[in-house]
């Protein structure tokens, strides 16, 4: 970490990546806040807010289930397959994606021009990053190192969707 701080280039690259991430995830709100609009709240606003609550609850429940599982000494060398984790390998990420999608849904109610819909890159970007860059690949590599070859783990990986719960996929 210290090397990142002392070398300008190695500090700059992660900083730019984070700045792009913040810009893209905030795009629906920034877009909406730049639209002069005094329209009433509508169905799409409440739909977005409701979806956000669902996503938040999904993430909180999944994180809590994993926290409780990990803190039980009987589960020291096990991986979680109970609760929401039986429907998805990463139900907390599913909740995160739903939350960013919900923000975009809600913002869409105020969009007035076609260009505003470019904001939908936000949840797509979040999904891509979690599935292909930072989230799933890093956790999968760590889990494979620990449990690869374990028949129960192999079955779980083969039969459980990575992000979108099996019942919804």
Image (cartoon, helix red, strand yellow):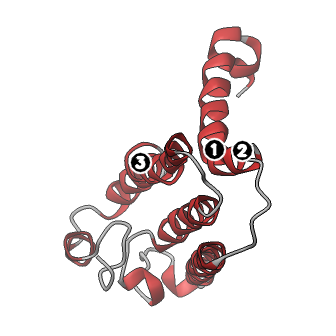
* Residue 9 percent across, percent down from the top left: 64, 10
Quadrant position of residue 7: top right
Of callouts 1 and 3, the N-terminal one = 1
Neighbour tally class for label 3: few under 14, some 14-19, many 20 plus, Cα within 10 Å: some
Q: Is residue 138 left or right of residue 40?
A: left
Q: Secondary structure at mark 3?
A: helix
Residue corresponding to mark 1: 27
Marks 1/2: CA distance? 5 Å
Residue at mark 3: 128
Q: Which mark is residue 30?
A: 2
Q: Are marks 1 and 2 in contact (CB under 8 Å)?
A: yes
Q: Residue at 36% of width from left, 71% of height from top?
A: 164
Q: Quadrant of the N terminus?
A: top right
Residue ID at (44%, 74%):
77
57 or 106: nearer the viewer: 106
Q: Nearer the viewer, residue 79 or 119?
A: 119
Q: Quadrant of residue 89?
A: bottom left
Mark in the foreground, 3 or 2: 2
- From mark 3 to mark 2, how far is it between C-alphas? 21 Å
């Amino acid at each position: 970490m210290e090397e990142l701080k002392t070398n300008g280039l190695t500090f700059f690259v992660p900083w730019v990546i984070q700045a792009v991430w913040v810009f893209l995830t905030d795009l629906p709100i920034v877009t909406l806040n730049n639209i002069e609009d005094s329209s009433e709240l509508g169905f799409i606003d409440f739909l977005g807010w409701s979806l956000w609550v669902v996503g938040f609850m999904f993430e909180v429940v999944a994180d809590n289930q994993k926290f409780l599982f990990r803190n039980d000494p009987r589960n020291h060398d096990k991986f979680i397959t109970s609760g929401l984790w039986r429907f998805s390998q990463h139900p907390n990420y599913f909740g995160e994606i739903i939350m960013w999608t919900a923000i975009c849904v809600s913002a869409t109610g105020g969009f007035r021009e076609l260009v505003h819909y470019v904001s939908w890159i936000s949840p797509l970007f979040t999904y891509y990053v979690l599935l292909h860059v930072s989230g799933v690949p890093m956790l999968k590599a760590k889990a494979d190192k620990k449990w690869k070859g374990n028949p129960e783990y192999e079955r779980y990986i083969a039969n459980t969707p990575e992000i979108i719960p099996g019942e919804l996929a």
